[in-house]
Each structure stands twice: as structure tokens, then as C-alpha cells.
Image (spheres, grey):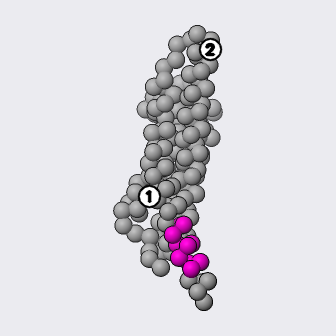
């Protein structure tokens, strides 16, 4: 069985490190908003990294799962399982934040308030959504082809 290598390793590593770094920054800002006095509040890059304790924790988990796959790079199937789970979680949270932005826009429309869509749609989870989706499709294709090949080999015996 081939090992987990090439451009997919670099792509997974880059996406995993981005999620870890941005999740850590979001967690720090969320912690400062919730537990520190106003004069000690940390503002990291405006609305791109909002103060969200749970969102930061989930991004750290996604980044950890994606980077964990690199430790299994000699076991192709297991590595791509980690990549699939990490990218599926990233897609889930990205879609969740798109739905939240849509709900905010609909709420502003119904009440007649002004809505600035760039504030809601400029979250890094939404911006990284296409990259996570591509990674999920690649890992799903590799897992599917590996499983199919193993099934054919075992049924031939």
C-alpha cells in the first residue's frame, strides 16, 4: 500500500496549522472577552477572529485532527480517515457559520435594520470552507478506492 505523501501532505499540513493558529487566537480572544475586565480585552484582527470560546476550541480540534494524520503518513488508509474526519468537521462548522450569517441577514431584513454582510461572512471558518471541501473530496476518493481495492483482493482469495 502506498504511503501518504506528496502535495496532499503539504496541503493538509497548511490547513491544519491554519486551523490550529486561528483557533488558538480565537480561543484567546474569547477567553479575554468572557473572563477578563474590559481594559484587558484582546482584539485580534477585528471581525476576522471574533471572540468565540467554543468556536476557537472547535478549530483547535479540527487542526489537531488534520495534523494528526501526518503522524500516520506511512499508513495511507488510516491517514486519510483522519483527513476525512477533520475536513468533515471543518465543513460542518463552515456551513454552520454561513447559516448563522444568513440568519443574521434575514433577521435584519425582517426588522428593517441595516446588515453589513462582510462582518458575518468574513470569518475564517467560512473563508477556509472551499479548501476543506476540496480536502474532503480528495480523502473520500482515496478511501473509497482503497476500500474497493482491498475488497477485490480479499474476495479473490
Q: Tell me the SS state at disc 2.
A: helix
Q: Is residue 36 visible?
A: no
* Residue at horizontal 55 percent and vertical 34 percent from the top: 98
Residue 20 placed where, x, y %?
49, 50
* Residue at horizontal 56 percent and vertical 64 percent from the top: 81
Q: Tell me the SS state at disc 1.
A: helix
Residue 53 placed where, x, y %?
61, 39
Which of labels 2 and 1 is toward the front?
2
Q: Which residues are magenta?
A: 143-152
Dot 2 corresponds to which residue?
110
Report which quarter residue 102 is drawn in. top right
Vertical placement of residue 105 versus 85, above or below: above
Q: Is residue 151 in the magenta section?
A: yes
Vertical placement of residue 136 versus 154, above or below: above
Residue 35 placed where, x, y %?
63, 33
Decide: few, some or many residues near mark 1? Use Cα within 10 Å; few <14, some 14-19, many ≥20: many
Left or right, residue 93 beside residue 44: right
Label 1 near label 2: C-beta < 8 Å?
no
| Label annotation for residue 12 | 1
Q: Is residue 115 in the magenta section?
A: no
Amino acid at each position: 500500500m502506498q504511503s501518504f505523501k506528496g502535495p496532499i501532505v503539504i496541503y493538509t499540513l497548511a490547513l491544519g496549522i491554519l486551523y490550529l493558529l486561528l483557533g488558538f487566537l480565537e480561543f484567546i480572544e474569547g477567553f479575554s472577552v468572557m473572563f477578563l475586565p474590559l481594559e484587558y480585552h484582546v482584539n485580534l484582527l477585528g471581525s476576522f477572529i471574533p471572540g468565540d470560546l467554543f468556536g476557537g476550541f472547535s478549530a483547535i480540534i479540527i487542526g489537531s485532527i488534520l495534523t494528526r494524520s501526518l503522524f500516520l503518513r506511512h499508513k495511507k488508509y488510516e491517514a486519510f480517515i483522519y483527513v476525512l474526519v477533520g475536513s468533515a468537521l471543518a465543513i460542518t462548522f463552515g456551513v454552520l457559520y454561513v447559516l448563522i450569517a444568513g440568519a443574521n441577514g434575514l433577521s435584519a431584513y425582517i426588522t428593517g435594520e441595516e446588515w453589513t454582510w462582510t462582518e458575518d461572512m468574513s470569518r475564517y471558518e467560512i473563508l477556509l470552507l472551499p479548501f476543506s471541501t476540496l480536502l474532503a473530496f480528495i480523502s473520500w476518493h482515496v478511501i473509497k478506492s482503497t476500500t474497493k481495492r482491498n475488497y477485490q483482493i480479499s474476495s479473490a482469495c
